[in-house]
Amino acid sequence: MKGVVLAGGLGSRLRPLTSVTNKHLLPVYDRPMIYYPIQTLVNADITDIMIVTGGNSAGDFLKLLGNGKAFGLKHLNYTYQEGEGGIAEALSLVEHFAAGEPVCVVLGDNIIEGNITGAVRAYRSLGGGAKIILKKVPDPHRFGVPELDGPRVVRIEEKPGSPKSEFAVIGIYMYDNNVYDIIRTLEPSGRGELEITDVNNAYIDRDEMSWEELNGWWTDAGTFESLLHASNLVAETGANKVEPSLAAEVSGNA
């Protein structure tokens, strides 16, 4: 499985901070924001990783990350997204890199307390389709919200006025190689972007979508409030924790 971190966009909700840099290079407590999604992938034993970035600060990612030595990696891949075409368009840029393998996609401003090792294992055992990770939140209307029927996802609605569950679809997704064919069928939304919710609903229509609930806290860091909240959570409890037994297993697989 290949790993993808999506770190493009203009970060307009964090201006003026993002007037001079990409938001994913901003600090979250004691590390740049981009460190957290990379570590999420590495903790799940995904070490072939591509960073998708854009804007005027793209070169700064290379200066900061190099080949990923800080994460125990021998190599990192980079690609550039022109403009703001949406999450699905950014994902389309990694088709050649994926080379037929499934991908685990993490949005660059997503930070979690624990790890996704179990979810990645469960997805690998399926042999295809897609998996989303969900988290119960007090304000689901701010996010993509799934309608669930037991283990089945019925539909995902983006920022609904009347949410059909307490869950938010967090920015961690797993897809097989069919995702690029799906993206090629999409039409831009009202905001001119190719939406990842449309990708997920296409998998639901195929009856090829599974889900798993995340343990521990999750937050994004795309607003001043959530950036502060993320920093406080990391300072108080730490992030990207791995159980000792899992750490030993991942180390043994490296």
Image (cartoon, grey):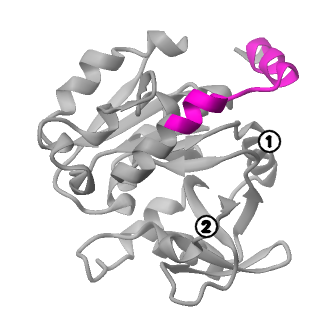
Q: Say which quadrant the C terminus sits in.
A: top right
Whether the magenta-drawn stretch holds residue 248 is answered as yes
Q: Which residues are magenta?
A: 232-252
In terms of sequence position, does the residue under pointer 2 or pointer 1 come before the other?
1
Assign a secondary structure to mark 2.
Answer: strand
Instruction: Using the image as rendered, state which of residue 208 and residue 221 is in the foreground.
Output: 221
> Callout 2: few (<14), some (14-19), or many (20+) C-alpha neighbours within 10 Å?
many
Task: Return the residue at label 2.
Answer: 168
> Callout 1: few (<14), some (14-19), or many (20+) C-alpha neighbours within 10 Å?
few
Instruction: Using the image as rendered, state which of residue 240 and residue 151 is in the foreground.
Output: 240
Task: Return the residue at label 1.
Answer: 118
Amino acid type for the residue under numbered disc 2: Ala
- Name which residue lies at 79% across and 13% down: 252
- How many numbered marks, from 0 up? 2
Q: Are marks 2 and 1 in contact (CB under 8 Å)?
A: no
- Name which residue lies at 37% across and 76% down: 186
Classified by dominant secondary structure, the portion drawn in magenta counts as: helix
Query: Is residue 5 something that shows in the picture?
Result: yes
